[in-house]
Amino acid sequence: MQFLTETDFKGIIGVNTLTSLRGAADANLITAEQLAITELDPLRSKFDVPAELAKTGTNRNGLMIRLMIHITAYYLFNTVDDNDIPDRITENYKTQIQAIAKIASGSMESTLTPAYDIEGVQKTSYRFGGDKPRDNDIF
């Protein structure tokens, strides 16, 4: 796995369930994590997602771990029949996708590392400047 560790799944997926879902040579687990990383795309315009994913150990961001673990678990359970997927896995996935949308739109605060442009200015969706307000007074 690229970002997550096996201990991150503790409390989310049982050890026996994780062992049965991970696939041969962890193929299902690696694919699930890669798919989870693609779900982070809305955050890339404002946040340095590659830098967050490169962090290891205790330096990893708790928000990123939470987002990744629940989304990865959802994709991991896509390898079984629909009846075998716990409802909480689907609900947790939906909650994390909503959180990503809120963080990307700026309506929810986060502790993620901001992205900077070439000049070293933080990327944002806030627009500076603009045209002067119109004056419709004819006198």
Image: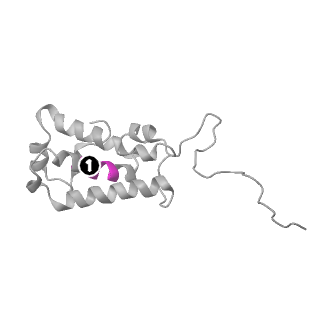
Quarter residue 95 falls in: bottom left
- Is 24 rendered above or below residue 42? above
Magenta run includes residue 4: no
Q: Residue at x 28, y 50 (%)?
A: 71
Q: Which residue is drawn at 31% across and 36% down?
A: 2
Q: Residue furthest top?
A: 25
Left or right, 32 with reference to 39: left
User: Mark 1 sits on what residue?
Assistant: 8
Q: Position of residue 60 (x, y in %)?
A: 39, 45
Magenta run includes residue 68: yes
Q: Position of residue 45 (x, y in %)?
A: 50, 43
Please tell me whether mark 1 sits on a helix, a strand or a loop: helix
Quadrant where the N terminus is found in the figure: top left
Q: Position of residue 49 (x, y in %)?
A: 44, 41
Q: Which residue is drawn at 14% across and 59% down?
A: 86
Overall secondary structure of the magenta section: helix
What's drawn in magenta, residue-wise? 66-73
The amino acid type, in three-letter code, at marker 1 is Asp
Q: Which residue lies furthest to the front in this view?
A: 138
